[in-house]
Amino acid sequence: MNMKFLMKVSGFIAAAFILSLLVFRVARADDSYVLAKDQVHDGVLAKSAERITIEGTVNGDLWVAASQIDITGEVRGNVYAVGSRVIIRGNVMGSVHALGSEVRLDRSIAGSVYAAGSLVATEEGVQIGRTTGLAGSDVMIHGKLAGQLFAGASRMELRGQIGSGARLAASEVVLSNSATVGDDLRYTSRLDAVIPNDKAISGKVIREMPPEDQRTENWSQRVVDSLIGLIMSVVTAVAVLALWGDTLVERAQLFRQLPIRTFGRGVFFTILVPVVCLLVMITLIGLPLGIILGLLYAVVLMVAPTAAGLVVGLQLIQPPHESSRQPAYGAKLQATVLGLLIISIVGFVPLLGPVFTLFVYLVGVGVIIATYPVQGSKA
């Protein structure tokens, strides 16, 4: 048995273990959830189901995960939606964050929009008050976008009205006669954009060629890959928090008191355990122990993003004087998703992004292997 084979087996068993947790969690979810037209929900609404329909009013943020998501009511906060098909045809007072195979927006959104999927479309009736960021294989832009537009796609079709400038990255960029841009149109592509009406663009049209060393991984592909990773991290977090949420929160809260020690444990574990596994596997007697240790190592690394997101999220939504309080499951998930979003966004910042991502990931490992706090001062 060679080492590569053992590592593949370890990775497969660890993946199967995590997948079983996800299946267990999904099996407990409702088949469907409906907030009827005459219903009003006060506060944060967090739901996961096979199908979610929001026809009523949500006086707060909306967090939903489902195969089919249809929002026709009013949300007086932010929307966080992950699903196979996400349709938003109701007014949103805050911002929209949507991930799915198909994402469609067709109403007034007062804040910003960040959406990604195979097909992403803003319909004719949409009005977006602030910045719009879209990524997908096919991106179709209609309606009125008051702020700047940032979009990456394989094929991009622009038919709407952009109040400010547009920054695009796509293999093919097509503007219709009805498209208007209030400032510069800057795009990255190897092909010239199809622009039938230059007068519709208030500023300059600036084309940039992709760098030769990035032929297979341009900006839009990086965004899509990052969002796919984010989706997987969120799905994993749903199961991990359901089973070990209280334990992770207790250990994550310890980071405020012992940040260096938590980070150091993460570094120590990440570097030392593979070395120990190799040394143990050299002997026939130690082979089973080495395999078990390798499985443990794989599981910790797969859960680490959840712990890292939880740590970052708790720093933002939980005041220091409430560190001893155990939040509800919905609050845990909200903090984790917020943290994962921040890590994903900061990861695009040159130089700082990779350093920050590595730091919080190692902190996540340190949180998982930490012992329980003792009198709030020891770990």
Image (cartoon, rainbow, N blue to C red):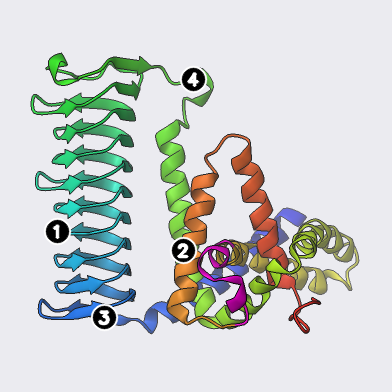
When the figure is inspected, residue 94 is found, relative to residue 200, above or below; the finding is below
Span highlighted in magenta in the image? 312-324
Q: CA distance from mark 3 to mark 1?
A: 22 Å
Q: CA distance from mark 1 to mark 4?
A: 39 Å
Relative to 347, say whether 287 is above or below.
below
Mark 4 → mark 3, Cα distance in angstroms: 47 Å
The quarter of the displayed image where residue 206 is located: top left
Q: In which quadrant of the rendered image does the C terminus lie?
A: bottom right
Describe the element under mark 3 as helix, strand or loop.
strand
Identify the mark nearer the N-term, 3 or 1. 3
Question: Which dot marks residue 31?
Answer: 3
* In magenta segment, residue 323: yes
Q: Amino acid at mark 2?
A: Val
> Relative to 335, is 193 on the left or the right?
left
Q: Give the labeled residue for mark 4.
A: 211
CA–CA distance in space, label 3 to label 2: 23 Å
- According to the picture, the residue beneath numbered tag 2 turns out to be 337
Kindly identify which residue carries mark 1. 89
Q: Quadrant of the N terminus?
A: bottom right
Where residue 154 sits: x, y (%)?
31, 34
- Ranked by sequence position, the earlier of labels 1 and 2 is 1
